[in-house]
Image (tube, helix red, strand yellow):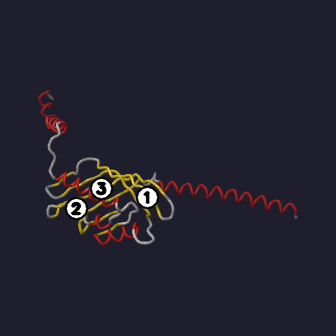
Amino acid sequence: MTRAVIFRALAPVSALAFSLAAGAAEAPDHAALRLLREELLGSVRKMDIEGIIRNLHPNIVVTWQNAEVSRGHRGVREYLNRMLGGTNPFVKSFKTEVNVDELTALYGESTGIAFGSSTDQFDLAAGQKFTLHGRWTATLIKVDGKWLVASMHASTNLFDNPLLNAARRSLYATAGASFVTALGLGWFFGRRRRQT
């Protein structure tokens, strides 16, 4: 292959790298998508369930970190009210820090895919507090000029998370206590047998 062919093959990559480095103009929709993100996070910080709902498409599908699925505004509202609202909520408080890996990938003028990471702090009504490091993906669509979340999937590491670690510690503690109890009972009954 000649040098000219190699340079021609690399030209698009070089042009892209240069345009990114020079701060090339991004699609105008990214400003609106940032606004959507800030509105959603503001509503989450305030525990404003209706504020969250306003930024979701009516046919939204959400897969939560506990693998539960909510469909539509009604399903999301019921889930959030059950977990966060009412007189006996499952989650006493919740904070999140959301990071986006890169600009939303736009497909045409009305669809986008965003993804990134999150650090979620949970304070459960039962007394447990823990932090989850998760990943998320969202599909965004523009309806009548407004961007809305059409689907979202949140997940965490199945093999390394605080709930699993707490369950593992509890199992070890229970096994240790059972072992000590069995030794004590064995010693007690062995001693009684020798005395009789």
Instruction: Give the quarter of the image for residue 85.
Output: bottom left
Q: Which disc is residue 150 wearing?
A: none
Amino acid type at mark 2: Leu
Could you give the CA–CA distance between mark 3 and mark 2, rounded to whole angstroms? 14 Å
Amino acid type at mark 3: Thr
Secondary-structure class at tag 3? strand
Q: Earlier in the sequence, mark 3 or mark 2?
A: 3
Q: Are marks 1 and 2 in contact (CB under 8 Å)?
A: no
Amino acid type at mark 1: Phe
Query: Mark 3 or 2, which is nearer the eye?
Result: 2
Query: Mark 3 or 1, which is nearer the eye?
Result: 1
In percent of width and height, residue 124 lies at 47, 62
Q: Residues within 10 Å of mark 1 (few under 14, many from 20)?
A: some
| Residue shown at 34% from the left, 61% from the top | 46
Quarter of the image that includes the C terminus: bottom right
Secondary-structure class at tag 2? strand
Q: Is residue 21 toward the left or the right of residue 87 in the image?
A: left
| Residue shown at 16% from the left, 63% from the top | 143
Q: Which disc is residue 148 wearing?
A: 2
What residue is pinned by disc 3?
137
Q: How many marks?
A: 3
What residue is pinned by disc 1?
122
Quarter of the image that includes the N terminus: top left
Could you give the CA–CA distance between mark 1 and mark 2, rounded to whole angstroms? 26 Å
